[in-house]
């Protein structure tokens, strides 16, 4: 019978506590609208593997939508992550239909904050994970200098500081990238290993 004084219970508690302390904290950046398929692959994998995460809307509001129109209320907004990058060990950029219009809205405060946060994670050489146009934004922020990246084929010509490949995913040092939401799975086991 398990009870408070049971040594096995105490041992299991200590092991669980060590695992929790060892796991990395992840900031997940979700654009508005976000590709739900991509976002939830990350979130479910993190949840199932005991990896702590907090979702930040790349928006002025915590309420965002998926590409398919489902409303989500996430943990916080990107403005509140800016300057607090040291609270996290890794960052995920979850792409979506907001990116094709990024150029028209690049001056918005939330997109300025997005680029500042990506640059800060890059300068600190923290783990950076993304799919679709993630590598393009990492490149724009100066975070992939010389590294191999997987990126959506339409964004491939935009990569200037790294080397865009035709592979489904690429892992180069602290940078984990997938071509699109349908290829996240090809790097997920390595992502989870890096975050545990």
Image: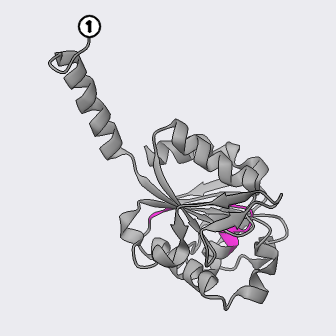
Question: What is the quadrant of residue 94 in the picture?
Answer: bottom right
Q: How is the image coloured?
A: one colour
Q: Nearer the viewer, residue 19 or 172?
A: 19
135 inside magenta stretch: yes
State the residue lying farthest toward the bottom.
Answer: 107
Q: Nearer the viewer, residue 196 or 171?
A: 196
User: Does any portion of residue 121 appear in the rendered image?
Assistant: yes
- Which residue is located at x 58 percent, y 72 percent? 144
Q: Which portion, as a residue range, is magenta?
A: 126-136
Q: Position of residue 96 (x, y in %)?
A: 75, 65
Q: Position of residue 73 (x, y in %)?
A: 62, 60
Which quarter of the rendering shows the C terminus? top left
Count all numbered tags in the image, as a single digit.
Answer: 1
Q: Nearer the viewer, residue 154 or 83?
A: 83
Residue 157 placement, left or right of 25: right
Residue 45 placement, left or right of 33: left
Residue linked to disc 1: 1
Residue 12 drawn above or below residue 42: above
Question: What is the quadrant of residue 132 in the picture?
Answer: bottom right
- Which residue is located at x 78 percent, y 48 percent? 182
Which quarter of the rendering shows the N terminus? top left
Q: Judge the density around disc 1: few (<14), some (14-19), many (≥20) Cα neighbours within 10 Å.
A: few
Residue 145 placement, left or right of 5: right
Residue 27 drawn above or below residue 139: above
Q: Position of residue 128 (x, y in %)?
A: 54, 62
User: Does any portion of residue 168 appear in the rendered image?
Assistant: no
């Amino acid at each position: 019978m398990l009870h408070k004084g049971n040594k096995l219970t105490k041992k299991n508690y200590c092991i669980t506590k060590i695992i929790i302390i060892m796991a990395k904290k992840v900031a997940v950046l979700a654009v508005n609208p976000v590709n739900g398929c991509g976002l939830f692959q990350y979130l479910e994998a993190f949840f199932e593997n005991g990896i702590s995460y907090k979702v930040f809307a790349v928006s002025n509001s915590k309420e965002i939508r998926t590409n398919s129109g489902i409303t989500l209320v996430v943990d916080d907004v990107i403005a509140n992550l800016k300057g607090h990058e040291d609270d996290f060990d890794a960052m995920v950029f979850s792409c979506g239909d907001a990116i094709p219009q990024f150029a028209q809205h690049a001056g918005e405060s939330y997109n300025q904050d997005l680029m500042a946060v990506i640059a800060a994670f890059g300068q600190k050489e923290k783990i950076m994970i993304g799919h679709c146009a993630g590598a393009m934004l990492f490149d724009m922020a100066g975070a992939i200098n010389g590294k191999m990246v997987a990126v959506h084929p339409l964004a491939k010509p935009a990569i200037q500081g790294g080397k865009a490949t035709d592979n489904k995913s690429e892992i180069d040092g602290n940078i984990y990238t997938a071509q699109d939401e349908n290829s996240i799975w090809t790097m997920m086991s390595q992502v989870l290993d890096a975050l545990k």
